[in-house]
Amino acid sequence: MSRYLSSRHAGLEPYVPGEQPKDKERYVKLNTNESPFPPSPKAVAAAAEAAKKMHLYSDPKSAVLNEKLASVYGIRAEEVASFNGSDEILSLAMSAFCDAEHPAYFPDITYSFYKTIAAMNCVPFYEIPLRPDFSIDVDDYIGLKGMIIIANPNAPTGILLPLCDVEKILRGNPDDVVILDEAYIDFGGQSALPLMKEYDNLLIARTFSKSRSMAGARIGFAMGSAPLIADLNTMRGSFNPYNVNSMTAAAAVGALEDEEYTRNACRQVIEVREDFTKELRSLGFELNDSKANFVLARHPKIPGGKLFQILHDDGFLVRHFDAPRLTDYNRISIGSRHQMELLVAELKKILEAYPNEKS
Ligand SMILES: *Cc1c(COP(=O)(O)O)cnc(C)c1O
């Protein structure tokens, strides 16, 4: 730390992303929930075309992209805005809608970035414990007097909160913003989008990183009532007016013109996830039904950190979280069928070799 850093940032602990090794090809990389599929060829072609004009600034409003999103999702263009990844939405929303009187509320086990951005924005926050089975108790989220953030499906649990429960939370907090982080909604969940008409406190955060195979392009979008979106645009214009670069905006439009490609990719991920879940259970792993492109699993015989280490040594990257309630588990991204077959074979080998005593 330099002697110049503001004291308000002295305790800041940045988000710890999953490992991105330089020699990625050497690993079966299942640690950051990336798509095993490349982006749509239409996205790649559109980005290449847009690159020819990179001497010009991008459109600060991302108008073409927003109109395309509005038509794909059946809403008005004023009800959507685009961002440099959905992480940017979450951070700007925290800054816009929270202060000392309006803290942020989110589950104790969820996307750890929420805590990071609360600290960054000097916003007080409360972590609401999930039930022992990692499900959300909706009664804990009624009348909170602050902004609520729910990842749905939740990460890293993969558990989906049903729409009727989402609605109870929206109805139970009419004077506060409720953010639904739907990063993984395309893998079998039901979006809160139909509730937008009725609830002007609903803000949906979406990303192209997972289901649309564009994590490296950095593009997310927010959907909500026009006044909420206007507030986010004020924040965006005050923070980084050209937040979406022209290659990425073009790529996103290209991807949206190829929705069949996305649907097909998601269908394959879901199929592989269901088969992999069965395989894990037959090997004695314990896991919830995931509605995301990852599973969270533990084995009664091997501590989570130990399994992580053995897999790592053998060239398999998964994610282990050093949090008290998660230490027994590993989060495993759903890769290609071939990658998951390699992993199952590896897990069989590890389990056969592992001592029967829990060490
Ligand atoms: C991956 C992820 C995001 C971030 O998405 P980006 O658009 O890549 O910034 C947001 N929320 C959750 C829960 C995620 O897992």
Image (spheres, rainbow, N blue to C red):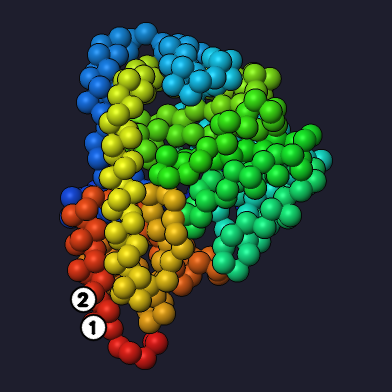
In the picture, the disc for residue 353 is 1
Identify the secondary structure beneath mark 1: helix
The answer to the question of whether label 2 and label 1 lie on touching residues, with beta carbons closer than 8 A, is yes
Percent across and percent down for residue 227 are 68, 20
Say which amino acid is labelled 1: Ala
Residue toward you, 61 or 199: 199
Quadrant of the drawing holding the C terminus: bottom left
> Relative to 294, does residue 186 appear above or below in the rendering?
above
Percent across and percent down for residue 241 are 53, 17
Find disc 2 in the rendering and name its residue. 349
Q: Residues within 10 Å of mark 2 (few under 14, many from 20)?
A: few
Residue found at the very far bottom of the displayed protein: 357
230 to the left or right of 303: right
> Relative to 26, does residue 94 appear above or below in the rendering?
above
> Relative to 248, does residue 162 appear above or below in the rendering?
below
Name the residue at 38% across, 40% down: 210
Name the residue at 80% across, 46% down: 143
Residue toward you, 209 or 74: 74
Name the residue at 47% across, 44% down: 189
Residue toward you, 138 or 226: 138
Q: Is residue 201 visible?
A: yes
Say which amino acid is labelled 2: Lys
